[in-house]
Structure formats: C-alpha cells, structure tokens
Image (cartoon, grey):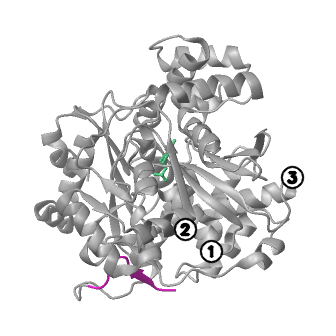
Amino acid sequence: MNFIQTRGYDENRPKMVTFSEAILSPIASFGGLYVPEKLPELGEAFLIKHLHSSYKTLAFDMLSRFEIDIDKAVIEEALALYDDFDDKNNPVPVVKVRENLYVSELYHGPTRAFKDMALQPFGIVLSSIAQKRNENYLILAATSGDTGPAALETFKNRANVQVACLYPDGGTSDVQRLQMVTEDAKNLKVIGIHGVFDDAQNALKRLLASSEFNAALREKNISLSAANSVNFGRIIFQIIYHIHSYLELVRQNAVSMGEKVYLNVPSGNFGNALGGYYAWKMGLPVEKIIISSNENNVLTRLIRDGKYDLRTMKVVNTTSPAMDILKSSNVERVLFDLFGAVRTKELMEDLESKNAYELTSSELATLRECFDADFCNGDEGKAYIKETFENNAYLMDPHTATCFKSFETCSNPEIKTIIYSTAEWTKFSPVIANALTGEKDAQDIVALESISKTASLEIPAMVKGLFSKKIVQGSVIQKEDIEKEILKFL
Ligand SMILES: *Cc1c(COP(=O)(O)O)cnc(C)c1O
C-alpha cells in the first residue's frame, strides 16, 4: 500500500511513498501529512473471524491488510512487546463502570500511559527499517510528560537509533520526570531545560529545520527523525485497540455483533480519535466518536460550530496536561478524508496565515455525522473522579475523567459507550489525591501513598521503584545550549 498526501502534491517530494518512507520522513508536500491511499475494508466478517482471537493475532491480521513494507518477522517481534503488559493474555482490559458505560484501559504498558500502545511496537519497526537501510537516526522528542518516557523506553538499546528527549524542568510530574532521568542506556539522552513545554517544543522545531544542525549530523552520518504523534507508524497501531475493545464488548455480551457503540476519546493531538475514525471506516459498528477535551477546548468549538479559531485562545495549564494542546495535528487527516486534498490545503493554509479556519455549513453537517464533542474543566473532572470512585468503585485519572462529562451531554443513554482511559492513577496522583480527599499540593510520593490507602490499591512496583532508582540523566540546561548538548552526546 502506498501513502498519499493530505494537501496534494507539490512536485518536489515524491507523489506517493511507502509505509517505511512515511515513517522516516513524516512531513509531506506543502507541509501536509501522509495517509493511506485507501483504507482496507474489513467489514463484519473480520470481526466475526477475530471474535476469539488474541490481541496479537487480531493486530497481525489487521496490519497485514494494510500491506505495509515491513517484514512479517519484524511485525511479530513488535507485537510481542504487548506480552510485557500487565496481563499477557489481554493488554487492554475493558471494564464495565456504569450502565452502558465501559472503560477501555490503554495504560497497562511499561510507562503507565497510553503512549505505550503505539510507541512500544513503533520502536522496533523504526529501528529495523534503519538497520535494513544501514542508516543511523537521531530521534528528537519534546515532551510534557508522557511521550518522553514512552519514547525512551521503546528505543532503549535499539540498534541504529539514538534519542534526545527534551522536557521542561519542573513542568512534569515527579513520576514522569523520574521515568526519564533514571533511564540508563548509551543511546539515550534526556535534557531538562529551564522553561516551559513550548520552549522545549520550539527548540525541537528549530533543530529539525536548522541546516547547520542537519549538516553537523550528516558529518556524523546521522539522519534526523521525530517520533511525534503525526507519524503514521504510530497511528496504525492505534486502530487495533478500538477493534479489540468492541470485540471485548461482544465477548462480554454487552453488545451483539453489529450493534453500534460510541467511542469516547480524551483528545489532544487527535491520534487516538483518528485511530477510532479509521477503525469505523474499516467496518467497526460506530454510532459516533465523542471528542472530550479540557479547558483547551478548540476541538469542542470546531465540532460544534465549524470554527477552528486560535485568534483569541491561549494554551492554559490544566489538571489533564497531556491534552493542553491547541494545534491538534491529526485533525488534518479527517479533513482530508471528508473534504479532499484541495480543501484541506486551503483550510490548513488559513490556519497558518490567519490562525483560524471555518467550515461551510454543509461541511460542518458532514463532520457532525461522525463526531460530537464537549469539554470538562478541572473541578468538574475532579468531581467525576470522586463520584465514580465512591459510587462505582472505579478509580480514573484526570484525562479519562473528561469523558464522563461528554458521556452525559453528548450520548444517547440507550447506546453503549466505550471510554478510553489514557493514564493510570499513578501518573497524575496529586490531582487524584486532591479529588478524593481534598489534600493540596502533595508531592507524588505522598499522594501515591494516600490514594493507595484510600482506595486500597497497591502502588505498582515499577512506579514505587522509581523513587529509589539512581538518577543518571542529570542535565538541566538553558534552552540556548540544547544544540551543543546534543552534539556533545552524539
Ligand atoms: C497523549 C495523551 C492524550 C491525548 O491523546 P491524543 O492521541 O494526542 O489525542 C490523552 N491522555 C493522555 C494521558 C495522554 O498521554
């Protein structure tokens, strides 16, 4: 299968690329993104076939339908990483929480957040492509907390790949920081910077575009790549768990085969939601995809009013920081799928030049046939955490909690909903402790112990162990010194 481009063809880059090429250089003509030429049609036959398949068998068959240029042995090796999730037989448990409300838990991997679902297998795929081509890659990552640990974990000790990961010192939770600064491997470099996430992100963009930096890398025979969430190599692994979660509902006799459900997704860069959209297009019975946001509610406004307008918006810090995003990159792939390349290019150019775009009323109607949306503020989220813990004996993190509001405001209560849970309680413990007991500004370790007591839950060993692990990645530097620091490491 070939990959085509969301903004059309500029006659400079290749017109179409393979999966490997789309992974290695994810930016397409006119700054667009790569998308599959045509989605495989799976239909109900595929669902019936895999009703009793393991996660890996389902995943392997789905990936084969994409006919990607990756060896079967590599795909098998990549999928084998799901064996290291909490339950070898089911990496993604789906739990009934309330009448007609099921939670699909995407956080049972090594770094306790949903980024592992895609980044774990992606690491093997990228490293194997690099080895096959006899090339070396530097992966740059800027993180506000979850992508960094997941990227380091997946590329640790992998051949032909090195990682430099930038994080804002003081801008992540203790657990997230410890997951990064205790990673001990020769091919990993973690750099704290004095600044906020945007400083890290801007530094990364500058380096990616810097001809000086690229020339210095070429001298060392290294090419530059990024593992960010527009990479189709990540998206492809995010289609699988939507299909799996639906099959879990069928297996639990919660729905009959073919019955439609809502997929309710806590959204930031729209990778998770896009995976659900593609699964739907490929034949999953979906009523609608519900997009849940926090106070950074640009997606709610787009889906309700057809306006993507950043002119009056500024990113605010919230209790669900992984969703503190205003430029939600993967929306572009939905625009392409619904309205085509010419219109997508026009809309994205409006966004770049005017900081806003507006859909026509008929385009908005088309979008709303697929999506609905609402946002949930921090206090509402904490109330849902407390209420769901007390009434349903279910503990969730602040990202997942945003879905409980849209569940109430956007869905027909007769139709079943799958809410996607994107982080374990251990990753955002101070907010959860505050929601449960009112305690304020606790350090992670104090909050973890308090929640553990209140909810009678063990702190997982891999989280507890972080607090006594040796810090091996101590650099915290000024943002002006990043380039020098990375070249020193290489
Ligand atoms: C990354 C992340 C999200 C947002 O996912 P997108 O695919 O970017 O929409 C939500 N919750 C958590 C905990 C995350 O780490």
Q: Which residue is mark 2?
A: 236
Between residues 316 and 46, which one lies in front from this camera angle?
A: 316
The number of numbered badges drawn on the structure is: 3
In the displayed orientation, state which residue is furthest to the front.
361
Does 215 appear above or below 264?
A: below
Q: Residues within 10 Å of mark 1 (few under 14, many from 20)?
A: some
Disc 2 marks which amino acid? Ile
Closer to the chain start, of discs 2 and 1, is 1
Callout 2 secondary element: loop
Q: Kindly tell me whether mark 1's CB lies below 8 Å from ligand 1.
A: no
Picture quadrant of residue 73: bottom right
Picture quadrant of residue 137: bottom left
Q: Which residue is mark 3?
A: 252
Closer to the chain start, of discs 1 and 3, is 1
Does 261 appear above or below 483?
A: below
Q: What residue sits 47% from the left and 58% below the top?
A: 158
Residue 43 horizontal side relative to residue 289, left or right: right
Disc 1 marks which amino acid? Leu
Q: Which residues are magenta?
A: 1-9
Q: Is mark 2 in CB contact (under 8 Å) with mark 1?
A: yes
- As measured in the structure, the alpha-carbon distance from the residue carrying label 1 to the one carrying label 3 is 25 Å
Place of residue 433 in the rendered image (x, y in percent of width and height, measured from the top left): 57, 18
Q: Is residue 370 magenta?
A: no
Asked if one can make out residue 188 in the rendered structure from this viewpoint, the answer is: yes
Place of residue 489 in the rendered image (x, y in percent of width and height, measured from the top left): 26, 48
Q: Is mark 3 in CB contact (under 8 Å) with mark 2?
A: no
